[in-house]
Image (cartoon, grey):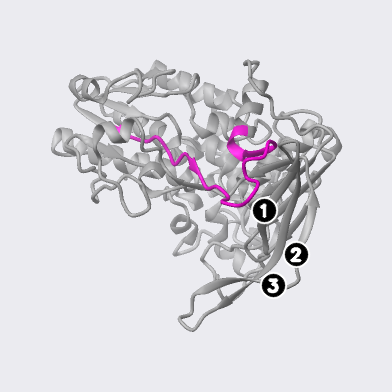
Amino acid sequence: MGKLYGFKEYNRQTAPKRPVEERVKDYKELYLEFPEESLMQQGARCMDCGTPFCNWGCSLGNIIPDFNDLVYRGEWKKAYQRLRLTNYFPEFTGRICPALCEGSCTLGINREPVSIREIELNIIEKAFKEGWIKPNPPRVRTGKKAAIIGSGPSGLSAAYALNSVGHSVTVFERADEVGGLLRYGIPDFKLEKYVIDRRVDLMKEEGIVFETNSHVGIDYETKQLLEDFDVVLLTGGSTVPRDLQVEGRELKGIHFAMDFLTQQNKKNAGKPIEDEISAKNKTVLVIGGGDTGSDCIGTSVRQGAKEVYQFEIMPKPPETRDDTMPWPLYPRTLKVSTSHEEGCKRDWCIDTLKFSGKNGKVTTMHGCKVEWKKNDAGNMVINRIPDSEFELKVDLVFLAMGFLHPEKAGLLEQLGVELDGRGNVFTNHKYETTVERVFAAGDMRKGQSLVVSAIEEGQKAAKAIDEYLMGETSLKG
């Protein structure tokens, strides 16, 4: 702890943002440079707690008090060395993680928490800028070969770990670029794609092979895969979106959110797209209150939407912690994202009854208000409020209600792996599926989650695979 009363002397600061009227004109990252002096002050706010709950809150177990203190002292290279011990990709988490660590920061009990995410991001960016990050291929190869299916954060994390201990790793990706949802699911204004390319280029130099446009189970038989590799790790994500089973769902103008976001990301990359989904001059409704819904708002605004609405079936979260989420639990409070700042009308406790339209195109959303109450068993149940029906004129609807499970056709059916009750790939505690030499991790195994959780899953699966192949392991997880 470098500054004894830094938490009293300095207030919380976060990275400045580009003005709304400027940033909505492009898809560039919206945060401006955080002055180094301000970052050092934020590091000084860390109290170096005897029991640092921030470590507990972070899925990766980042040694947060250590790198906070090192940043305060100006020892940036040591801060990077400490950070890389636990987090392979701070440039991803520093941009798009909801900062679970900050929710568990002890300072947050009666003050604003330390700006941990900003510190993490600036450590890794300074490391790239100063040239501290260089390819580090293993000195010795084990002769073992691992195939990883899916190049999202879980697959990349496992690939990095397995390669680091000498296994030969090939990552198969059915899309034309590496990254999974990082590449095509998250808008550039949150994660510019050079960030992914920069990391993937390093991984290639370290010996990892990436096979894009390779759809295992469709154009690469799984039988051949098992013959070519010693182990297979499934990290294909949770890709089947939750749908609305209501009248009028088939009308044109109603789309899954990911179709819209993927298309815009491809357009930004200069790739050809078919059947463009455009929000220009349209009234847009986003159904779903999570990050994906927020991304649809920001993208619609940038495309020139006339109006944007966001409806959520759940109740409006409280603005501050309540008794249901005591510290150090992550506070599920009302979030106002950067996309919300750019303009939209939000409402909660809204259920979709049906859609109607004209000439096969959606024109109206029919909804009603709902209320949530506990039943006799203590479970929350939803009830529609009588006489609360309403109509909203819309031109475009995006369904952003999350994902159910991985796709079963092709890869999973060919392998014959067992699924759990939710439709995810079933594994034991060692990440082994019911098929010999086949492992699974990430959203494909546990259901939709956060990027930081996916990276953790990849690390743990890699450790299990290394132990399976070698009888012992030195990997973390």
Q: What stretch is highlighted in magenta?
A: 233-259
Q: Of tags 1 and 3, which is closer to the observer?
A: 1
Distance between the Cα atoms at labels 1 and 3?
A: 16 Å
Q: Which residue is drawn at 82% across and 40% down?
A: 20
Q: Residue at x 78, y 56 (%)?
A: 391
> Residue 385 bears which disc, if any?
3
**Is 158 placed left or right of 99 in the picture?**
left
Q: Quarter-wise, where is residue 377 in the image?
A: bottom left
Residue 39 in sight in this render:
no
Q: Where is residue 323 in the image (x, y as percent from the top left)?
A: 58, 76
Q: Where is residue 465 in the image (x, y as percent from the top left)?
A: 23, 37
Q: Does the stretch in magenta take in 245?
A: yes
Q: What element carries label 3?
A: loop
- Mark 3: few, some, or many residues within 10 Å (few <14, many ≥20)? few
Q: Where is residue 435 in the image (x, y as percent from the top left)?
A: 19, 38
The residue at which mark 1 appears reads as 354
Please state which amino acid type lies under the numbered disc 2: Glu
- Residue pushed farthest bottom? 376
The image shows a total of numbered marks equal to 3
- Residue pushed farthest front? 359
The residue at which mark 2 appears reads as 389
Q: What element carries label 2?
A: loop
Mark 1 or mark 2: whose residue is earlier in sequence? 1
**Is 77 placed left or right of 356 in the picture?**
left
Q: Position of residue 52 (x, y in %)?
A: 47, 60
**Magenta-highlighted stretch: main secondary structure?**
loop
Please state which amino acid type lies under the numbered disc 3: Ile
Q: Quarter-wise, where is residue 316 in the image?
A: bottom right
Distance between the Cα atoms at labels 3 and 2?
A: 8 Å
